[in-house]
Amino acid sequence: MPLSDSFFGQKFGITEHDLESYLSEALGAGGDYADLYFEYLATSQLSIDESIVKSAVQGVSLGVGVRVIWGERTGYAYSDDLSPEKIRKAARVAACIASGPSKVDKTGFVEARRRDLYPVVTAPNETSLADRVELVKRADLAARAADRRVFQVQASYADSLCHVLIATSDGVLSTDRQPLARLGVAVLAREGAGVSQRGYSGGGGRVGLEFFETEHTPEHFAREAVRQAIVQLDAVPAPAGEMTVVLGPGWPGVLLHEAVGHGLEADFNRKKVSAFSGRIGQLVASPLCTVVDDGTIRNRRGSLNVDDEGAPTQENVLIDKGVLRGYLYDKLSSRLLHSKTTGSGRRESYQHIPMPRMTNTFMLAGDSDPEEIIRSTPRGLYCANFGGGQVDITSGNFVFSASESYLIEDGHITRPVRGAMLTGNGPEALKYVSMVGHDLKLDEGIGICGKEGQSVPVGVGIPTVKIDRMTVGGTGG
Amino acid sequence: MIEPELASQAVRTALERGATDAECTLAEGEEFSAQVRMRALETLKDAGSRRAGLRVLIGQRVGSAHTSDLSHAGISQMVESALAVAAISTEDPYAGLPESSELGSLTGDLRLYSDDIHKFDTAARIQAAMDAEEAALAWDPRITNSEGASFSAYAGGRVFANSRGFAGSYRMSSCSLSATPVARQGDSMERDYWYSLARSHSHLDSPANVGQRAAERTVRRLGARKVPTQKAPVIFDPITARSLLGNIFEAVEGDGIYRKASFLEGKLGERVASENVTVIDDGGLAGLFGTSPFDDEGVPSRRTVVIDRGVLRSYLLNTYTARKLGMRSTGNAARGVTGNAGVGHGNFFLEKGQRPPEEIIRGIRRGLYVTELIGHGVNIVTGDYSRGAAGLWIENGEFAYPVSEITIAATLQQMLMDVEAAGSDLEFRGSVASPTLLIREMTISGQ
């Protein structure tokens, strides 16, 4: 698509000549590379609470970020005003990082090969508000009808439509239209005067509103949230100490995100501050484990046609049969480490500098029957769902909290437990994987990853996996 | 600074187009940051942005919108957008602005803005970060690497106006200096950090102190081991105790209370903590980070005693949660620039006790001194508490060796009752603060 037909060409009259002149301004004081990231973001959020649609918000945000790279140095500035004077001013501020003649040979722009991983004709943000508010109303009704012990229901729906234009001094010109939607239901349930328990379920992706019509209906998420809360009513305190842990399929893949993924982001490895630094080719997991990061899965929350530096996303093998194969690179780290970008440069908005990030991170399916995995475990913990996790990438230590877990006793899943926290060390934890199920499942599409103050949507996934040894933190015996 | 009149104009426009009430927030900010790593400049960022947000009521229906376009057309579009979403919301009998009599602003100089943050040029700011990193690298031969050091400065302003006649604005500034060294010993690699944060450049700690403190904190983690699973006393240092205060805030803020989603719901007037626990929220302390002349609904900031020597005295409320509970706003409304206000805190802190932290540590025969908490294992509904931890093991009143890859667990109810001592070392390094805290016993999971 010619620039003149693109969103920014149409709405703001931006031409290739303009982009070239802004890039020249950015490289006016020298530098190896410069890029421009234009972003127009329209968002809406609707929520129902106590069966009342209490909050409805719409917003628009517009801006451009200008970056100049000179060796290991980055200069960055942005403007929320797209007038040529303001963009030039931002370019001059970013240019302050460099000095001396620019090493960039201007060659004009080559438009990236186009593909469409999210062929959504009408983005959720472009549908009527009445249709979208119906989703939270249905979720509220379904959750209240599901069980008499439910006493609080909050359902929220959020969508965004992001138009980006990325122009770089190495000749990339990319545009993309990125829809995103998410529906979530949170409930509280209580039996008589007992302790209240929370349940949460949600899903979405880079999808149209029709996504919520089949399978991923408001009723589906509502019933799932209620189920999780009700299960917790009978939960006993989590055990404490080292034991066998079995992860259920889907969202528990967040373990890979924390234990492995962050430690393989190339910025940490360039600085040699990751527990995985210098370990390419080494065994860092059981040979049963193959872990990939794939930004090209259709309609997934973590997917992108091009990353936020204009490079196409791709499938990156991180761990192949237990052996560490590669890192996730953005442009800066690939330049400095003499590698190629893996399409992993992402940023929260035009106000942020890109860095290497994950997209959809998951473990490939193995051969084991999930039921056999449980039967083979005399005593342990089965984790069906998780809350959040966190990792210290330098020591490699990570934790994550289980929001739904059960004791495994004599090869059977028995009592639900509450408050379980798993902790381990990234390069060590996956060495204890002894069985991998054939039931790979990706999560429902609610993940948000935070790094250095920047949040981006991501996906995770995993089949049923047995880890022979892991520390569980709880208060029980 | 943005023209404050713009907010009142947006409110008037909303009323002209059919809103029965409206409130508008304008925010602007300029950020600067310089990051250095291994003695070289790595990143410079310098930019500013502005934002407007509007919330309208049509009767008891509410709608909100926000925009980065502060032109006449942008504001007009924002008004239309807010009115459009109000039309699809549901009547909420409790929705509304504060009463006129509740609106107001603290007077006097709250020292939120200082011109001196502009005093230093880019070169001096880069040098401050360089000096902090150098101090860390020079401190100990085991500091072999660095994730860098940074200097950042911020200046911004906030304007708020509503249809009940409130119009107010204030400016804020801040600057910070931080260092994150990496230490290595054999196979063990650890990082930690230290920082200084102030509203005025003159109150910022020196680069040498920031770097040295960061280095000390990093080196002392080297060679960490797990400890056996057991129950033992746990001391939270002031940094990790802050996160515990954050949990207490979540348990007393009005949203969780009226939803019955807090373990402290229905406990006003009851003993919920030991005698050693007095928790205060004070939005009026000059020069601090939780300070503002008025909250995000135009209600004056104030001092509220939340827990008095163990007895729960007050929740923290905005207008909406106060109405739901049949109470009065405590001036704790908080929001970005738009949407229904949530509940935030001013300077939220636990009052200091008598004993210096060294003395508290000396009194422990065997226990854990926590310097880092990770993960999200706190459930405010049930009070269940389980977090990843790192720190130092105490034997006979002295630090014996570092520990990591463990978790600590209990319930918040029990932890509050078990606060055996609050140290004398209360220091405000942000809007939440706590002295060192000693908890009688928690479950530590390790080997």
Image: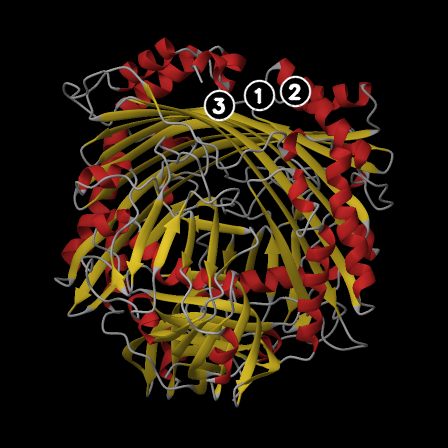
The residue positioned 56% from the left and 22% from the top of the image is: B2
Q: From the viewer's perspective, is A245 left or right of B98?
A: left
Quadrant where the C terminus of chain B lies? bottom left
Q: Chain of mark 1?
A: B
Q: CA distance from mark 2 to mark 1?
A: 7 Å
Marks 1 and 2: in contact by CB < 8 Å?
yes
Reading the image, the residue beneath label 3 is A80
Q: Residues within 10 Å of mark 1 (few under 14, many from 20)?
A: many
Q: Amino acid at mark 1?
A: Asp
Q: Nearer the viewer, residue A383 or A477?
A: A383
Residue on which disc 1 sits: B69
- Read off the residue under disc 2: B75
Number of marks in the image? 3
Give the image location of residue B337, x and y in percent. Answer: 62, 35
**What chain is tagged by disc 2?**
B
Residue B335 lies, in percent from the top left, at: 63, 42
**Could you tell me how far apart the alpha carbons at marks 1 and 3 are, in whole angstroms?**
8 Å
Neighbour class for label 3 at 10 Å: few (<14), some, many (≥20)? Answer: many
Q: Locate residue B159: give its quadrant.
A: top right
Q: Provide the chain ID for the residue under circle 3.
A: A
